[in-house]
Amino acid sequence: MPRVQFRVNGSPVRDTLADASTEFPDAEFRILASQPLDDHLFEIVEVTTSDGDKLVRHFEDAPEVRSFEVIHSHAQTILIRFTIPISETYNALLESGNLPLYPIPLHDGWFSGEIRASHQQLSAYVAELSAAGVPYQILSVTQTHDSVELLTERQWEFVTAAVEQGFYDTSRECTLSELAETLDVNVSAVSRLRHRAESRIISSFVAEAGPKNRS
């Protein structure tokens, strides 16, 4: 599944949190959690700033902020939670079925983040941003593989059984014939399963860890 690094500018579309970050351009915002509540968004944000008192007053005085609370404050770091209207930037994620990976840095109006999405979800996300007039930058798109997506269900079943029964131990604890019995197939079928599963795993490993991808 593709892993996408992106930047989104919320300032042109009146994003409350993005606007706050432009008011405090030297501050570093880190969104730790977000939860949509009807047409509002509950968020927990960590802010590093030398203007903590001024930042707190900004949120307390903002009419669009439904609730606001300072959870913790230490030195120049403030942990706050609040409820604000759902912005076009976050709505694009919701409408395209994407969820960001936290924390999300925010600086001077720009959110920086990562999502793991199918090509269809990524296309839908970009379309939502464009339709809403939200400036964005796609910084990188890389293909990731997890073991469940890499293998078919039957291949994954073979690999799991082979590992559990010691087929890949240095002193092999079971044979292909025994694995065939476990999986209720003949030896020829389990041999094909083994070949295809190992081929996919090895090909993926070489693609990810080969010399051209090493630093």
Image (cartoon, rainbow, N blue to C red):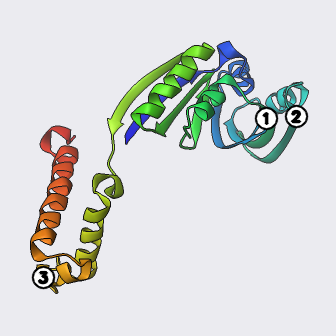
Residue to which mark 1 is pinned: 40
Residue at x 24% of width, y 79% of height: 184
Expressed as whole percent of the image width and height from the top left, the position of residue 205 reads 20, 52
- 197, above or below 67, in the image: below
User: Element at badge 2?
Assistant: loop
User: Pointer 1 and pointer 2: residues touching (CB < 8 Å)?
Assistant: yes
* Residue neighbourhood size for the residue with mark 3, other residues' Cα within 10 Å, grouped as few (<14), some (14–19), many (≥20): some
Residue at x 22% of width, y 40% of height: 215
User: Element at badge 1?
Assistant: strand
Residue to which mark 3 is pinned: 177
* Residue neighbourhood size for the residue with mark 1, other residues' Cα within 10 Å, grouped as few (<14), some (14–19), many (≥20): some
- Residue 157 shows which numbered tag? none
Residue at x 16% of width, y 87% of height: 173
The type of residue carrying mark 3 is Ser
Hey, which quadrant is residue 83 in on the image? top right
Hey, which quadrant is residue 153 in on the image? bottom left
* Left or right: 193 as drawn, with respect to 85: left
Residue to which mark 2 is pinned: 66
The type of residue carrying mark 1 is His
